[in-house]
Image (spheres, rainbow, N blue to C red):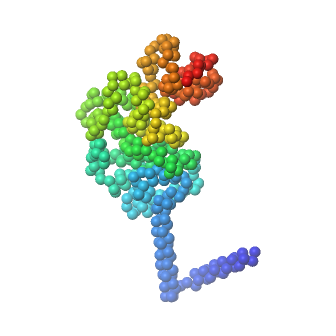
């Protein structure tokens, strides 16, 4: 109590002295004027030093990554080619005034959100994408081929049409984690550097060919999709429903437009954008469409390299952390595994677009009904069936469990659909 009283009296005396000094201040007194000038200059110098120091401190990578809600963005940034740059290099427009504006007026709502906002939602750029001016601080708009030399892109022509760089290069710094649904706050625990190696792949960092196809199709229809605000922004799955074409519809439209290409329209042939491409030799096999199962089993990494969703559709499906981190699905060290192939065939839209149709080898339903037992003699034979008919647990579930099953296969027909009393064991 005595210490509190002493502090209170000390503050009181200091207050009284300040009030007394202010009341006794006179502009006519030259000493008072010099004292005022001295303290005013001191206040400005100290204030400027504190202001610039705070700006420098809040402009570092360490500051941006200090908050746990930025963990996905920080991990992905460290694993991409832009890791050497600070966050503000891309997220603040060029120029001193833009810098000060962003660090003062622009920072206020962000501070409010972090302090009092709903942190259950993921972070994403909802209002303004990264501008071309930011990219052009380092990159030239005169480039016509990619560094690897396999892709022809008229960057200058795209920029002249006010097409934003991030429309095509959305994953260059953060691997499209927003579009993939991988930065929700309840999943932050997954974002370690070790896991990041499995979650950040070339397909997520490079240009999404599906965006190119979607944009070119719309342009040939007379649209200018890049002028729509949402087209170049990253939204989490379900936040904004775009009108992107489905895979089947995309192929049909591409074929139709290519056959009736008019002046001023953009061709969709590979040679329009790619200087070279290689079609695998086994694709030329006469019956490849119907018998490529063994190729997929043994060369899955090569198949997915061309046919993954990230290269064919603009709107990426929401991904699952457990599946991404499953060591069996690490295609860099892939070993033939029919279960992995089955999962990929159902998840990858390119594969599922065909697997949803009844195979020619199934003949007609009435014939196949009594003829399908002979082709299924081994466990591997059964697993091939389960590419479409889902997991092997389905052959042993009860009717009640079947009704409650979360169907993930293209068909709801299972072994127990007919074999209600059970099946012979398949070795």
Above or below, 131 relative to 316: below
Report the front residue among 27 and 77.
77
Residue 208 lies in what quarter of the image?
Answer: top left
Residue 340 seen in this snapshot: yes
Report the front residue among 324 and 215.
324
Report the front residue among 294 and 341.
294
Image quarter in which the C terminus is found = top right
Residue 287 lies in what quarter of the image?
Answer: top left
Report the front residue among 179 and 190.
190
Residue at image coords 48%, 69%: 53
Residue at image coords 32%, 27%: 284
Image position, residue 242 (x, y; %): 44, 37
Image quarter in which the N terminus is found = bottom right
Residue at the far front in the pictured view: 427
Above or below, 349 relative to 21: above
Residue at image coords 51%, 23%: 378
Residue at image coords 37%, 55%: 134
Left or right, 131 with reference to 154: right
């Amino acid at each position: 109590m005595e210490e509190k009283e002493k502090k209170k009296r000390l503050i009181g005396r200091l207050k009284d002295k300040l009030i007394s000094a202010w009341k006794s201040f006179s502009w006519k007194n030259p000493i008072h004027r010099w004292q005022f000038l001295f303290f005013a200059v001191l206040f400005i110098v100290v204030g400027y030093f504190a202001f610039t120091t705070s700006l420098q401190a809040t402009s570092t990578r360490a500051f941006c990554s200090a908050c746990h809600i930025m963990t996905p963005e920080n991990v992905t940034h460290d694993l991409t080619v832009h890791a050497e740059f600070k966050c503000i290099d891309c997220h603040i427009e060029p120029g001193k005034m833009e810098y000060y504006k962003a660090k003062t007026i622009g920072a206020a709502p962000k501070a409010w959100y972090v302090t009092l906002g709903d942190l259950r939602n993921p972070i994403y750029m909802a209002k303004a994408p990264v501008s071309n001016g930011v990219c052009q601080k380092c990159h030239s708009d005169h480039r016509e081929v990619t560094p690897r030399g396999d892709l022809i892109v008229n960057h200058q022509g795209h920029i002249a049409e006010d097409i934003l760089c991030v429309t095509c290069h959305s994953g260059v710094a953060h691997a499209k984690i927003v579009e993939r649904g991988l930065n929700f706050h309840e999943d932050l625990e997954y974002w370690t550097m070790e896991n990041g190696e499995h979650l950040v792949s070339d397909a997520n960092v490079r240009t999404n060919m599906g965006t190119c196809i979607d944009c070119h199709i719309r342009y040939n229809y007379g649209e200018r999709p890049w002028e729509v605000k949402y087209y170049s922004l990253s939204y989490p799955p379900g936040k904004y429903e775009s009108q992107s074409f489905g895979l089947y519809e995309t192929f049909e439209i591409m074929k139709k437009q290519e056959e009736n290409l008019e002046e001023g329209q953009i061709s969709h042939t590979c040679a329009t954008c790619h200087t070279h491409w290689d079609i695998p030799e086994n694709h030329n096999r006469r019956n490849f469409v119907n018998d490529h199962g063994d190729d997929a089993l043994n060369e899955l990494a090569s198949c997915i390299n061309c046919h993954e969703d990230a290269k064919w559709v603009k709107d990426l499906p929401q991904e699952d952390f457990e599946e991404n981190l499953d060591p069996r699905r690490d295609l860099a060290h892939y070993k033939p595994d029919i279960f992995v192939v089955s999962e990929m065939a159902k998840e990858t839209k390119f594969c599922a677009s065909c697997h949803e149709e009844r195979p020619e080898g199934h003949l007609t339903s009435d014939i196949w009904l009594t003829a399908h037992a002979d082709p299924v003699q081994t466990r591997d034979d059964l697993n091939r069936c389960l590419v479409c008919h889902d997991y092997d647990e389905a052959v042993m579930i009860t009717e009640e469990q079947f009704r409650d099953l979360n169907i993930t296969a293209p068909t709801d027909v299972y072994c127990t659909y007919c074999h209600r009393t059970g099946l012979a064991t398949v070795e």
